Amino acid sequence: MKGLTVLAAGAAPEAHHGLAVTLFAVIVLVTLGITLWAGRRGRAAEDFYAGGRDFSPLQNGLALTGDYLSAASFLGVTGLIALYGYDGVLYSIGFLVAWLVVLMLVAELVRNAGRYTLADVPALRMRARPVRAAAGTAGVAVSLLYLIAQMVGAGSLVALLLGTGDGPAKAWTIVAVGGLMIVYVTVGGMRATTWIQIVKAVLLVAGSVLLTVLVLVRFHGDLGALMQAAADRSGAGRAYLEPGLKYGEGLTSRLDFVSLGLALVLGTAGLPHIVCRFYTVPTARAARRSTIWAIGLVGGFYLMAVVLGLGAAALVGSSAVRSANPAGNTAVPLLAAELGGGTGTTRGVLLFALISAIAFATILAVVAGLTLAASAAFAHDLYARAWRREGRPEVTERQEVLAARVSAVVIGGLAIVLSLFAQRLNVAFLVGLAFAVAASANLPTLLYSLFWRRFTTRGAVWAVYGGLLPALLLVVFSPVVSGSPTALMPGVDFHWFPLENPGLVSVPAGFLAGWIGTVTSREPADPDRYAEMEVRSLTGAGAV
């Protein structure tokens, strides 16, 4: 899945370690330089939250790509394809299809109706305090879940690529990544975060193109020969190229896959760090063009991921990939070493280290975006508005930005602590849960606010909590927490919900709760405020 599972530390060849660490250090220095440069260019709220709203569609499209594609997209999805063939490809489709929902229903309308956060949209036509309290809480929850998974994945990834195992190096990596993301956000804000994501996206796409070309050259451009070689070395034969190798074991397995797919397809449009990106461009048209760029880049990446996964199976072998790491997360680095001439060659070592460094860059970019989204939801929605008492003076822009910087430090510190406790656990479900919460709580509120004239404040609050609470509750009583050997608490069994991802139940629950809250509300919707919002979202008249 999109978040890294807890990785079994595969032993990377010693020759790779020094060069990989050197390239890691170069990436850290470059990103810190970008942060210091960006931090001097503006200190207003618009600069901190939206980067001054002066990024071009191409720049924002690259930043969206960098925000969306994590290290596990680069390593995990490719590994799934290397191990499971057709089912791995099927798994990756949800990440791409999700962008059609973003393009058709969210990008332009949110850019016109909002200002800095997702909660700005429903607050435009409803009582702001309860709506911001609910949406801000959900935004922080989604970002924190995603953040913990990425940081644990960072520690696991570096331990895996450097062969350091699960010792102190893994914990120190989590602390280092957490410290860097705090610096990126507090010093550079959205401008620094955006440029870091742009650099990461360029590196990721360039690295993927390089490996894809090398794989195709190895097979003389014959995709049929590549697929046949992958099937031959997969250990599954013809079944590797057919559905059912991973997700076809039974009805529960298939329903779980449908549930996860539903969360992935619908959740992207409700992820706070994705929604915030649409505020960094000057117009709704630019937001739409940004999304089109992102669809092209993300789509191209996943097409290349298919070739890389097949290449890893064909050249490295599925058994070798699985022995290095059961989840397949070393497939791309092992493929890079093989394409360079083997682990004992200079080119093999160089290519392995380069791909490892790109994977590290993806981590830094994603955690920075998540931290910024969480701090924006806290400072802009909760601190400055939802928690402000009636009759007290409004929070100034300077106070709000200061609160956002402080909250970034607190949220970053909390994420570090939680990640250190969670580093020995299987946290893959956290990302699926983050997508499920976003699809269950944020998306119903967003769509109802934009398209349903009768939607009320009660409906918005009920939609958020009606999706958030079932998602969390169902996971607690799922096989992820108890009742299976890989559960968080393997020694006990109190699960009664059979699926690992709650999306199949919690997403409809969020939409249903929003509808029930609206039809039972004694306070009718304000038709004038809805009309104002409709005009603003569709035309941009009055947009910030």
Image: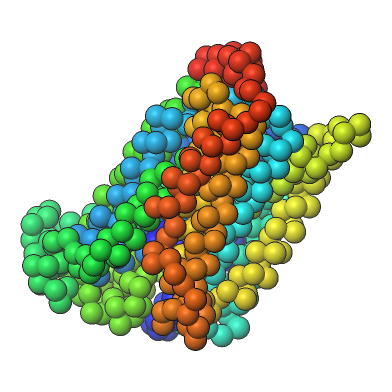
Residue lying at 63% horizontally and 13% vertically, measured from the top left: 528
Which quadrant of the figure contains the C terminus?
top right
Q: Residue furthest right?
A: 392
Residue lying at 51% horizontally and 56% vertically, measured from the top left: 471
In this picture, residue 89 sits left or right of residue 502: left
Residue 101 x/y as whole percent: 39, 36
In this picture, residue 163 sits left or right of residue 40: left
Q: Quadrant of residue 411?
A: bottom right
Given residues 451 and 328, the one toward you in this image is 451
Residue 65 x/y as whole percent: 44, 45
Residue 85 visible at all: no
Report how many numbered discs are placed on residues in the image.
0
Residue lying at 54% horizontally and 17% vertically, measured from the top left: 534
Model colouring: rainbow
Which quadrant of the figure contains the N terminus?
bottom left
Residue 58 x/y as whole percent: 45, 33
Residue 473 x/y as whole percent: 54, 61
Residue lying at 49% horizontally and 64% vertically, measured from the top left: 475
Residue 100 visible at all: yes
Q: Is residue 136 above or below residue 313?
A: above
Q: Is residue 485 above or below residue 152?
A: below
Given residues 141 and 526, the one toward you in this image is 526
